[in-house]
Image (cartoon, rainbow, N blue to C red):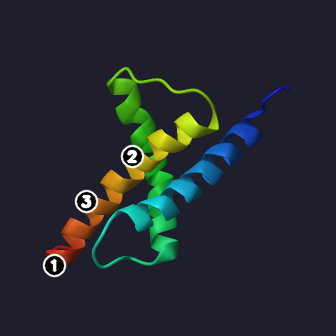
């Protein structure tokens, strides 16, 4: 199977959306809502991939990508909620 740039980007978008949904379920406290959690999940997918690469952790496939994206999304949602609840946003 030949992966094109479009299929790779679409895959990361899907993984990021799932990670955003999971991060909303994993983190506790007042939420931003499903749309904001999904958006943060997209950004968190990139952050999670970056963190895993820095740590030398490499997973292959859908589950590995989802794990990295979820870790990044949870971190990003937790940080965003900290700033949102402190009144700085």
Q: Earlier in the sequence, mark 3 or mark 2?
A: 2
Residue displayed at 45% across by 36% down:
49
**According to the image, label 3 marks what residue?**
79
Q: CA distance from mark 2 to mark 1?
A: 25 Å
Residue displayed at 40% across by 24% down:
57
Rendering coords of residue 25 (x, y %): 43, 67
Residue mark closest to the camera, 3 vs 2 = 2
Residue farthest to the top?
Answer: 56
Q: Secondary structure at mark 2?
A: helix
Front-lying residue, 46 or 61: 61
Circles 3 and 1 in contact, beta carbons < 8 Å? no
Any mark on residue 87, and which?
A: 1
Residue displayed at 23% across by 74% down:
84
Left or right relative to 18: residue 51: left
Residue mark closest to the camera, 3 vs 1 = 3
Circles 3 and 2 in contact, beta carbons < 8 Å? no
Q: Please determine whether, in this image, residue 1 is positioned above or below residue 81.
A: above
Mark 2 packing: few (<14 Cα in 10 Å), some, or many (20+)?
many
Report the quarter where the N terminus lies: top right
Q: Earlier in the sequence, mark 3 or mark 1?
A: 3
Left or right relative to 9: residue 66: left
Any mark on residue 71, and which?
A: 2
């Amino acid at each position: 199977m030949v992966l094109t740039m479009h299929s790779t980007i679409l895959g990361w978008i899907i993984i990021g959306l799932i990670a955003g949904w999971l991060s909303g379920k994993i983190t506790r406290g007042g939420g931003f809502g499903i749309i904001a959690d999904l958006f943060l999940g997209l950004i968190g997918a990139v952050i999670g991939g970056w963190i895993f690469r820095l740590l030398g952790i490499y997973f292959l496939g859908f589950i590995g990508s989802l794990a990295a994206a979820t870790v990044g999304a949870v971190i990003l949602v937790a940080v965003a909620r900290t700033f949102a609840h402190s009144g700085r946003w």
